[in-house]
Image: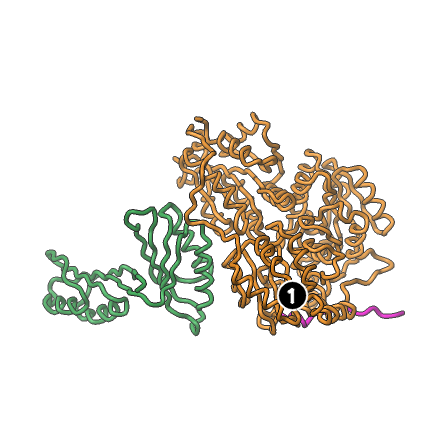
Chain colours: A green, B orange
Amino acid sequence: MIAENSERRVVSVIVVNEASVLSRITNLFSGRGYNITSLTVAPIPDSKYSRLTIVTSGSVRVIEQITKQLHKLIPVLKVYEHADLVEKEMALVKFPITENVSDINAICEAYNGKIVNVGNDVIITMVADEPKRVDHYLEAIKRYNPKEIVRSGAVALER
Amino acid sequence: MQISGAQMVIEAFIAEGVDTVFGYPGGAIMNVYDEIYKQDGFKHILNRHEQASIHAAEGYAKASGKVGVAMITSGPGFTNAVTGLADAYMDSIPLVVISGQVPMSLIGTDGFQEIDAVGISRPCTKHNYLVTDAADLPRILKEAFYIANSGRPGPVHVDIPKDVTAQIAEFNYDIELDLETYKPHTRGNPRQIKKAMEAIANAKRPLFYLGGGIVNSNAAYEVRDLVHATQIPAVETFMARGVLAHDDALLISMLGMHGSYAANMAMSETDLVIALGARFDDRVTGKLSEFAKNADVIHVDIDPASISKLVNADYPIVGDVKNVVIQMLELTSQIDPDKYESWRDTINNFDELHPLTFHEDEERLKPQWVVKRVGELLGDSANISTDVGQHQMWAAQFYPFSRPRQWISSGGLGTMGFGFPAAIGVKAACPDKTSINFTGDGSILMNCQELMTAVEQKLPVINIILNNNFLGMVRQWQTLFYDKRHSETDLSAQPDFVKLSEAFGGIGYRVHTKEEFDAALKDAVEKNVVAFIEVIVARFENVMPMVPSGGSLFNMMLLEKKETK
């Protein structure tokens, strides 16, 4: 890994919602040995398109090249390389019910979240915040012995 | 009308004006071959290997300017074709390649001759399709031809399961394509073009850098007009040979790793590079940080991803090179052609100092002489294909090209075995021209089964084998950079090339002297049959001049001056 020029980048891609389009896109990253940190896809309402949000890191030059190659793919409508954006990510965490539930709830609220499910043995919390703040949240709840953590990957919109 | 998927393929080919299809049948594509049997709208040429079918379609496409079409079966048929797809992708050759696939119900079950064909072809095609419903076929086939031959051309692969070729559905080819996400730029931005022309007018030492995109966009004659109107000297890439005629006073020569001294020095000294349909390949630029170091760059290309990919463009112009050059031609009045006279003189001095040449040898034929001699004897009347290696570079350096599409060679991928099948495709496209394939004793064995195709189809390709009993280009690098350790490049064990050709029904010649060569070539052209002319050439001849890999263009290894006896 060449670390010195490596930069975190968020790229959004609008694509025709059809079979194989995801592998066309991820091929451009894997063919260059680049890792995708996170990737989210969902259909855009009332259209034949889907929106992908890709978080990756790499040299500016290579990411620019990948962006241009993304444009070249036939099913790609638009590519946005974000500079000024609103970025959010969701995390679900499962805790043993024996942990201090009111503490956990208070921390969740500080990170724009709440308890979303209570079972016999476990509770599940949800937070939605900037990816950096989700990191902080996951750090903060470590002492409550989280059993399972799932992150959604970032979604982003330009301001 | 209601027809089967297989019939749709035939109908679409006829509607697209396809006259020749190269291919090889097999289980999964049999329904389509059954329809080929019944029709007489186009000719099918049976190659003896699927790789050769794709190369033949490439040769056909490059020589004719039309989309090349090939057809293969699933599994090994398809995987054999992958090298050809990759070759066409690298050199931007428009192809539509149809492959059979196992029936839909067997996909994903490790069925007999099953392979994930679209998964494999994805990174080596411009676009690909897996057809899951015959009702989609008319649109997909129409899109395939359109995508292959528009924008930056390239191969499009259509994979059709066997049950889809049997399925009956409505066929209507008279449809408007609605490709919202694919709209290639064709006209350049007029303001950018104006700024570029001002930069040319202000430059002291401008240089045209002509690339293969000019051939693809059929812009060679407009480019000739632009070069002549401005009197600015020009270098050609390997892929652009023939854009300017060999005797054009403004053509310096080819540049790059085996380019001429004058071309590479001109590129190193210019203050304005005018790149037309060229992509700054590493074999052209050498060390990037030293490439055209003091120059601004105008870069005209239809592919936005090519612009500023390797060398930053000060004047990027996205557009079809033909349209852009026509737009540029309207603005040439501000350019004073006399201004560049001393620049032209400088370049001529470079050329006089180290001309592109070679030393004759009294005992052994020199491969460069053979290329030059073919040029003298056949010149414009021949189309020139090549395989890959030393012979390819000598052909690019020494053949007197006079027109675009005369030169057919595997540039980007460098595929040994390309030449002979490509030359078959070239002959099918241009029956009135002699089809020559310059090849080496290494390359020719990689697709020599095509002797059978050429003989059967009466496509008289003349293969000139420059035989040095070496895998020559690798041997040259071993000599120069690996302290003469010639690892696995000695090809002394060889077939009898004369008998090999004869075994398939062609003719063969083995020549050692100039007189023998002249006689053999004349005889082969006259007899108009498939031929091998094996020319025994000097074994240790190197391709010179040479920019060592990663070196700067101005730092060339040059032909040693001949000792005077």
Closer to the camera in the image, B362 or A40: A40
* A9 relative to B519 in the view: left or right: left
Question: Could you tell me which residue is drawn at 46 percent across and 54 percent down?
Answer: A72
Q: Residue B263 falls in which quadrant of the image? A: bottom right
Say what amino acid the circle numbered 1 marks.
Answer: Ile
Residue B478 in the image: above or below residue B128 = below
Q: So how many labels did they put on this image? A: 1
Looking at the image, residue B251 sits to the left or right of residue B12; the answer is right
Q: Who's the residue at 27% across and 69% down the image?
A: A132
Is B373 or B353 nearer to us in this picture? B353
Q: Position of residue A126 (x, y in %)?
A: 19, 61
Q: Which stretch did the figure color magenta?
A: B551-565
- Please provide percent x and percent y for residue B136: 42, 36
Q: Position of residue A43 (x, y in %)?
A: 30, 50
Side of B401 where A6 appears, left or right: left
Q: From the image, which quarter does the C terminus of chain B lie in?
A: bottom right
Disc 1 target residue? B335
x and y percent of residue B521 in the render?
A: 81, 45
The quarter of the image holding the N terminus of chain B is top left
- Based on the picture, tell me whether residue B389 belongs to the magenta stretch: no
Res B471 seen here: no
